Image: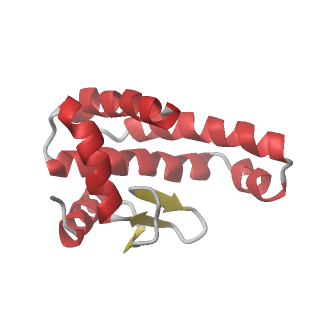
Amino acid sequence: MLYIWNIEKIINNTLQELKLNINVEFSDKLTAPMSYNVSTNTIKFNYIQINGYNAKINFKIKETDENFVKIMLYHQLGYYLEFRKNTRVLKTLIYGVEDEKEQLLAEIEVNSWEYGRTLVPDYLLKAYDQVRELDKLLLKV
């Protein structure tokens, strides 16, 4: 079981290694394991959601808890990179029409996995790709 302080330490250490200045915050109201908020430049996490997600996915990929948290973090950092590289995203999400927003959100999801993958160390690439595929299956359920 991963505890709040363990998750926070893993996230902060990884951000420090990557030399990224992003805030980290625990939220028991978050309905996802982790999220990136561009307006506050904050990674939020919910340890209960993380442990639940870990239970659903990790039996297939067999990674340590620390590596599993890092994999989820790299995906969230993909959102960070997407918002930094694509400035039209926020404007469209705020002012765009529903069809445009829906299409953009799908594009952001794909890009976040791709951009996040650029940060993943070689020893975790296979597991990252497996989590990405398993995540797609979970979203369909």
Q: Is residue 18 visible?
A: no
| Left-right relation of 113 to 57 | right
User: Residue 32 versus residue 9: which sits nearer the camera?
Assistant: 32
Residue at 55%, 33% (x, y): give it: 110
- Reply above or below: 46 against 138: below
- Reply above or below: 120 against 28: above
Residue at 82%, 46% (x, y): give it: 98
Applied colour scheme: secondary structure
Q: Is residue 3 visible?
A: yes
Numbered label tally = 0
Q: x%, y% of residue 54?
A: 26, 47
Q: x%, y% of residue 4?
A: 24, 70
Residue at 76%, 45% (x, y): give it: 101
Q: x%, y% of residue 46?
A: 36, 65
Residue 99: quadrant of the picture? top right
Q: x%, y% of residue 81?
A: 51, 48
Residue at 21%, 67% (x, y): give it: 9
Query: Where, quadrant-wise, is the N terminus in this rendering?
Result: bottom left
